[in-house]
Amino acid sequence: MRDAEIRPWLFLTASAFFEIVWIVSLKLTDGFVRLLPLVVYAVSGLGAAVLLSMAMRVIPMGTAYAVWMGVSVVGALAVDVALFKEPWDAFRVGCALLILTGTCGLRLATTR
């Protein structure tokens, strides 16, 4: 795969990570009263939007959005379990794997 083909997917991946930071920082703002998480919220939200926009120059919008949301949802679930001690059981793992499977399927469908 050439650099020009990989770059949009790197933008999309980075955007999804910014989205994970965005949602975690939203939780940490405590109703928008804590300043540092609020600044992180604003910067990461803007970063997620800009990078997603750059990815959508090449990746079809529906595919980009689905992959972005899939990675973001699974990432947020992982952070929820790791940092906020939310329960993690076989059903939740199975659902997360279904999201990732669908996301990978859309990625493969885009290359055809």
Image (cartoon, rainbow, N blue to C red):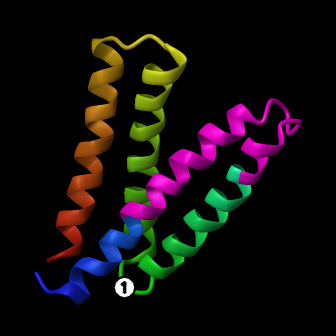
- Which residue is depicted at the point 21% across and 56% down? 105
Residue 64 in the image: state x and y as whole percent.
41, 67
Q: Is residue 67 above or below residue 29?
A: below
Quarter-of-image position of residue 8: bottom left
- Magenta span of residues: 13-39
- The overriding secondary structure of the stretch rendered in magenta is helix
Q: Residues within 10 Å of mark 1 (few under 14, many from 20)?
A: some
Residue 35 in the image: state x and y as whole percent.
83, 43
Quick one: 36 or 109, which is closer to the camera? 36
- Which residue is depicted at the point 23% across and 73% down? 110
Horizontal relation, residue 73 to residue 110: left or right: right
How many marks can you see?
Answer: 1
Q: What element does badge 1 sit on?
A: loop
- Which residue is depicted at the point 62% across and 49% down? 22
Q: Which residue lies furthest to the front in this view?
A: 36
Residue 72 in the image: state x and y as whole percent.
45, 47
Q: Let me know if residue 1 is in the magenta part.
A: no
Q: Which residue lies furthest to the right in this view?
A: 33
Quarter-of-image position of residue 97: top left
Quarter placement of the C terminus? bottom left
Quarter placement of the N terminus? bottom left
Type of the residue with mark 1: Val
The residue singled out by tag 1 in the image is: 58
Q: Is residue 12 above or below residue 76?
A: below
